[in-house]
Amino acid sequence: MKELSLLMFFIALLFGMSVLIRSLIPGKNPDGSAFYIPSRGMFNIIWGSIFYIGYGILIYPDVQIAFILGIADGLLIFYALFLMQIKKFLLNPQKKGSAILRRYLEKQLDRCQKNDSGNKAYSFRKCMKILGLAPYTQPDSEQIAQRLQKLEELLQSGKLSHPYLPELLQKLNQTLSH
């Protein structure tokens, strides 16, 4: 049982850090997007990683390793809380967001616009990533319509006034209407 726990710890450490690193370093995945609503699956991976890294802190007797793991766990906790604030901001048009949050999202929209300049249409998978839904979500799902409505409300509320947001919504609607 101890070996399985250790294996889960290493897997959690690998996945947790890879999620954090992938979010910081832009990739060339055609289905990836810099601007997206954080998904439940991403939160599950992050919280699971936080739990198992915490377990690693408890089982390692070496103080330096426990300290390094504590820093990694702290970064993941901060990242999870930051993603929760982004999700609240994007899905609740009445909620005010901090200036830091808006600037971050505007930079993500800038990156998204730059990455999409050569790509006219979105794939269904990319649309689901932007909407924060699982890629296996049914095309006629009510969740898709709700998330599109929330982004439309975000645009109309003026909370996030970026010139690329209307085009992003148009691309999402165009892909999802087919």
Image (spheres, grey):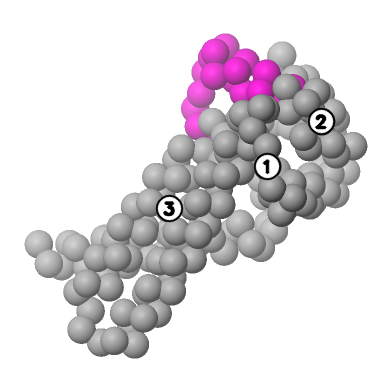
Residue 42 spot, x, y in % from top left: 48, 45
The residue where tag 1 is placed is 97
- Residue pictured at 50% horizontal, 51% vertical: 81
Q: Nearer the viewer, residue 54 or 12?
A: 54
Disc 1 and disc 3 in contact, CB within 8 angstroms? no
Q: CA distance from mark 3 to mark 2?
A: 31 Å
Residue 95 spot, x, y in % from top left: 64, 33
Q: Earlier in the sequence, mark 1 or mark 2?
A: 1
- Residue pictured at 52% horizontal, 44% vertical: 84
- Residue pictured at 60% horizontal, 18% vertical: 146
Q: Earlier in the sequence, mark 3 or mark 2?
A: 3
Q: Secondary structure at mark 1?
A: loop
Q: Nearer the viewer, residue 52 or 125?
A: 52
**Residue 1, placed above or below residue 173:** below
75 sits to left or right of 168: left
- Residue pictured at 43% horizontal, 70% vertical: 72
- Which residue range is magenta in the image? 134-152
Q: CA distance from mark 1 to mark 3?
A: 23 Å
Q: Secondary structure at mark 3?
A: helix
Tell me if residue 76 is in the magenta stretch.
no
Q: Is residue 169 visible?
A: no
**Residue 53, placed above or below residue 158:** below
Tell me if residue 148 is in the magenta stretch.
yes
The residue where tag 3 is placed is 46
Residue 137 spot, x, y in % from top left: 51, 23
Task: Determine which quarter of the picture holds residue 4.
Answer: bottom left
Q: Amino acid at mark 1?
A: Gly
Q: Secondary structure at mark 2?
A: loop
Residue 66 spot, x, y in % from top left: 31, 79
The residue where tag 2 is placed is 158
